[in-house]
Amino acid sequence: MREFKNFVVVKFGGSNFKIADDYSKVIRKIREMLEFEKSKALVVVLSAAYGVTDKLIWAVNNFQSIDVHSFLNELYDLHASFLSSNDNGGYSQTNEELQYLKSKVFELEKIFDALKLLGKVPDFAKDLIVSYGERLNAYVVYRLLLREGLDFELRNPKEWIITDGKFGNASVLLEQTRALFEKGLSEWNANHSIVPGFYGSSKNGDLTLLGRGGTDYTATVLAYALNAEYVVLFKDVDGLLSGDPKIVKNPMLLDKLSYDEIEELSYFGAKVVHPNTVEPIKNSSIPLYICNFLEDFNLSKCTVISSEKHRSERCVKSVSFTDDVAIVQFFGANLGRVPGVLGEIAKSMAQAGLNIKFVITSQTAINLIVSKKDLPEVMRVSERLRLIEIEEVSYRTDKALVAVVGYGLLDTHGIAAKVFGALAEGKINVDMISAGACEVSMYFLVDAQNVKDAVRLVHKSLFEEKNN
């Protein structure tokens, strides 16, 4: 086998694998990439087929009542049908392929049987079961590539990616992962690779998921560990847009963003990339391209995310939102100026493994903005606090957060006036504002029922009206 000079990492998401014919398109895209980068090793990272992760999560949540055998037969039939896809047409599965596929699918039967006896689903078991979506899809694509005469190796991320061991939403231990790759670099450099995304392994050897959308994260982790030239995420959109096309009119395609800008957008609502995607490649300045799967491959037509701090003519690059916010409010006389209170609150949350999105304080209140899923635990921790300064703790879940992101927006005259002027004209009240914590973004809270109107009005003011 020849030795390649460098690596390129490409990722295909679930939306690229909806029907059997889509697999032929993916194989053609991989051929296109191989032709474009003849001297480089291609590392292809794959999500589960469309809808399969949701099916597996549903099965886990209903493990007591489902007919496991029927469910697994459906899972097998689906992936067996994908194995029929090739560019020459016809039904091409071999007995060897089908037998192996069936054996992998029905590994889950023993796991489900054990869960029924146990009467509950331990976290490690849920992560293990849900990871099968990526495993099965990677095997299908791998076999299709071999059938086409393309030289690929199927690799197991459990052997290469080390995580912090947090089930369901693990973070990758980058330096330890990279050390593994340095020892095995010649193996990766010998041929092209197929890698299922979405999971890794803790130091103890437990399989741990990287959170929904975690295949993006897998791709950039591999890019960092292999010191890749660049990463491509193939999506079913042209790239990153100035707003959600389901909400705003005529969103603009963004040709470039910085790492900071995409981190802010993904953290507060934009679902184009996993929130941890940028972290592995940021310090190594590895470019990330978001490209339309249906278009001919051309990096100049993709959104590129890099270390460049590009300031656009409008300053604002995009408007995003999330309704996954809850406000936990601590009240007390002079609460805002008593030393140590906020620190004690934050320390207690950290010890419980809870993330605070951001904090807004006043003389008589401290407001924590957290994820709704964390609210019950946040309230439990809050009620255990023994601080005499805190007189009352309450929460709200009727708000949503709007993020306005772009270099220069905080020091450009008139941006804030346009944003809040548009909201005032639309009679939308703003509850809380956070600006200045990061040079590329500002956030504000509105009633959840008004959030889409708020995004629409702000986007119109910044991108659609004349004289912007």
Image (tube, rainbow, N blue to C red):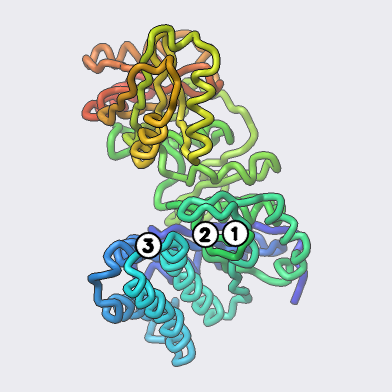
Question: Which amino acid, by three-letter code, is at mark 2?
Answer: Thr
Residue at disc 1, secondary structure: strand
Q: Locate residue 82: give its quadrant.
A: bottom left
The residue lying at 54 percent from left, 13 percent from top is 339
Question: How far across and down, in percent of the image, does residue 61 sit?
Answer: 30, 62
Question: How far across and down, in percent of the image, does residue 299 sit?
Answer: 57, 48
Q: Give the residue at mark 2.
A: 208
Residue at disc 2, secondary structure: strand
In which quadrant will I find the N terminus?
bottom right
> Up-down: is 134 above or below 244?
below
Left/right placement of residue 21 relative to residue 149 reads left
How packed is label 2: few (under 14 Cα within 10 Å), some, or many (20 or more)? many
The residue lying at 53 percent from left, 64 percent from top is 207
* Image marks 2 and 1: residues in contact by CB distance under 8 Å: yes
Q: Earlier in the sequence, mark 3 or mark 2?
A: 3
> Up-down: is 183 above or below 250?
below
Left/right placement of residue 264 relative to residue 419 reads right
In which quadrant will I find the C terminus?
top left
Between 376 and 175, the one lying in front of the other is: 376
Q: Earlier in the sequence, mark 2 or mark 1?
A: 1
Q: Give the residue at mark 3.
A: 53
